Amino acid sequence: METVLYYLLRPLAFLPLKCLYLLSDFIYFVLYYIIRYRKRVVDDNLRQCFPDVTAERRRAVSRLFYRNFADYIFETIKLFHISDREIKRRMVFENTEAIDRFVAQGRSVAVYFSHCGNWEWAPSITLHSHTDGVRTAFCQVYRPLKNKAFDGLMLRLRSRFGSVSLPKSTVLRRLIALRRDGFVTVTGFMSDQKPSHGDPTLPLLFLGRPTAFITGTEELARRMKMAAVYWDMYKDSRGYYRIVTRVIADDVSETAPGDVTRVYASMLQQTIQRNPSIWLWTHKRWKIPVTLP
């Protein structure tokens, strides 16, 4: 099935993005007006996170979110056939020097990221970072999809620029093995969604709502004495993104428990408030009630 999906979708990737965006406009119309894909979830999330914003403004954010979501679909398909030169022009990274500095010191880096903009283009960091002379492994943590065909397809796309995908259940073991083999790792953690059952969490006030934040990323980084940075995502225009690297901690093991998670939550909130339409509002982030201490 994975092979079938590959040969069905790959021809689309040969189209220029301006053509794919015409298809995206059509899919946006279908998702928003016909299928109304998870529209109740989106509307409820926006209403509860922005209660002081007018209903008209929330509807505008919702429509723009669905446009961005449709773009995300076709931009991800484009990964099957996009040159390094074009992706470097469209996915720009700022302050990668901070990551390079940690790597040069032999310190691995935990990259706090989120489902903002087009997160599938972020593995192109390998085209921007300069870690010459240091054995560096660029990785991303993922939760395997239930659909094996789509899971295999996404793994193929996520390795497009040479990064390694690590299943969440094996990430610590894999990172320790890479360190033992002499690699310094730069690993992306998508820590903004609903925790899985059994995940250690920290309850915080986020977008005005009690929210459980995953602390496993911080605990892993503390155990491995990693640095921590945040990737602040901007969508400058259609098909053009920018990630600014912001340092959270030079060494997580030297911070108090929970501090790194709190800083991440605060930075993510600023990103969303700056441009709420680029976050993934279809996710049932607050499905499980949380009580603040």
Image (cartoon, rainbow, N blue to C red):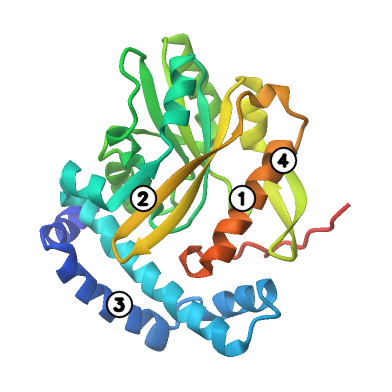
- Of the numbered discs 2 and 1, the one sitting upstream in the chain is 2
Q: Secondary structure at mark 2?
A: helix
Marks 1, 4: nearer the viewer: 1
The disc labelled 1 sits on which kind of residue?
Met
Identify the residue at horizontal 36%, vertical 15% (top origin): 135
Q: Determine whether 130 is above or below 202 in the image.
A: above
Residue at which label 3 appears: 27
Amino acid type assigned to the residue bearing label 3 in the image:
Ile
Q: Nearer the viewer, mark 2 or mark 4?
A: 2
Query: Is residue 3 at all visible to an observer of this figure?
Result: no
Please report contact status of discs 3 and 1: CB closer than 8 Å, yes or no: no
Question: Residue type at mark 2?
Answer: Glu
Q: Secondary structure at mark 3?
A: helix
Residue annotated with mark 2: 120
Going from N to C along the chain, the mark reached first, 2 or 3, is 3
Residue depicted at 24% across the width and 57% down the height: 77
| Label 1 Cα neighbours within 10 Å, binned few <14 / some 14-19 / many ≥20 | some
In which quadrant of the rendered view does residue 35 lie? bottom left
The residue labelled by disc 1 is 267
Using the image, determine if residue 162 lies above or below residue 46. Answer: above
